[in-house]
Amino acid sequence: MSSYADIKIILKMGGETIEFDNNRLTAFQIVKTFNDHFKISFKGEVTANQDKYYEMAVYEVHVEVYFNPANTLIFNGVLTRITVHPNPEERTVQVEIEGASYTHYLDVNLFNRAFQDQAMTYQTLVDTITKTYYKALGEELANADKPIETFTLQYQETDWQFLKRMASRLHIGLVPEVTRENIKFYFGMPELKERGVLKEIAPFYGIRKRLRDYRELIASGISDVVEDDFLSFDFKTDELFNIGDYVYLDSDNKNAKLYVYQATMTLEGSLFRCYCAVSPLYGLKQKKTYNPRITGLSLEGKIVAVGGADSSKDYVKVLLPMGVSTDKEKACWFRYATPYTAAGNTGWYWMPEVNDSVLLYFPTCKEEEAMVTTSVRRQESESERLQDPNAAYLRTGFEKELLFKEGQITLTGKDQGLHIYLDQKQGITIESPSELGLQADNNLMLQAGRNLVISAQGDQSAIQLKHKDGKGNNLILNADGGIGFKGKVEKESGKLSRDDGCD
């Protein structure tokens, strides 16, 4: 039977190693929970090296716990909280210490990252996160080669929060590994040691059915679980159990494994006790979680492609400043939301252009529902069009423009010479560097309140009024003053008919 004497606590600070006197322990607990950091807390009186415990409030301290008789390392982590209470009368100090597994380092700082390569595997994604940490040994992944399959955004999340959310996509959780001085964890429940039959380990055990967990999973769309998967069995033992160890409910059914998903190691009086909870593996499935911080979020990015995969054309590719890759070939296609587009032929269809700055909008907490909503102007150069705040214009990259100014509307087909002006004072002016055609399927009427002026410039110019197919009346006004006429002339006083032209 194990006791406090079988526990050895080592505290490391810089190059110094201090062994906590387990004879002075007044409380001790290690809590190991599936999909959470492993935690330790203990307190006791200190008579020697008291100054060192004050220094621990300033420096980084590593905590190791060994369990005899095999001197097995059962916890390895970092100190997260220390309280020192002096007791001058007895010349001792009361020390309270809390610590966490090294995965705690993943849960300190907030990061923003964008993963657009949908073929990226979960192994590559996790490696991208953990490689930035000192002494990151790595991880062991279930479904390591499975691709992430969708745009993935880490926004104002710690790496631990983000990795837990990624694991939830596969309906699994994370398990810290605390037998080494490294940041190491399992991506999914590990299968460690077979520990025998539950009834033989603990003849008296409790049983629970976690119906809330079951109903939440069913509501989230997971259909391959049943109520009995959420049966949990609780037992107490003086042996050491770890997350991932498994037992059998009875010796007749070796296929029904029950996995340890919680283990609490503590002292009852002077005796060591381990409280465990076991469950079928399917009962440990995690529902898919989301990051609520992205709801309503808009991120600025730059357009690198316009079009879409296959027959979908109303899509764009956007590179974000926080992206882990700048490869536009691996970027995701995002739906572009025009100001108004009806299901039929009405609406306003106006796609952005490559290199435009745009906003990627997240209407919900689901990254896959992100869309590009609008463009953002960057004042990279001065433009005359932007000097008057009362002027509004629409313009494409092909020199096509519609300009609205006070008293005037200008339609431009080409910057050099092709314009239509609608002016409140001067009327309508049409400018064309080449031909100008007016065509009507029925009648074409030109009517003026005073004068109707038709002019042509140039020595070789002429004004011609003629029938399209050459038949009927023709009138030619030459630049030298000559007039050519062919056809019939009607006057109020009578009619004059000629079959040949006259000059």
Image (tube, rainbow, N blue to C red):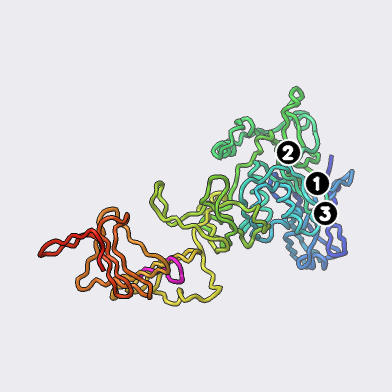
Q: CA distance from mark 3 to mark 2?
A: 23 Å
Q: CA distance from mark 1 to mark 3?
A: 28 Å
Sequence-wise first label, 1 or 3: 3
Dot 3 corresponds to which residue?
181
Can you identify the residue that label 1 sits on? 270
Along the line of sight, the residue nearer the viewer: 147 or 302: 302
Rate crowding at label 2 as few (under 14), some (14 to 19) or many (20 or more) other CA atoms within 10 Å. Answer: many
Q: Secondary structure at mark 2?
A: strand
Residue 262 seen = no
Query: Which amino acid, mark 3?
Result: Glu
Check if residue 416 falls in the magenta segment: yes
At label 1, which amino acid type do we have? Ser
Magenta residues (range): 413-421
- Classify residue 500 as left or right of residue 248: left
The residue pinned by badge 2 equals: 260
Tell whether label 2 touches label 1 (CB within 8 Å).
Answer: no
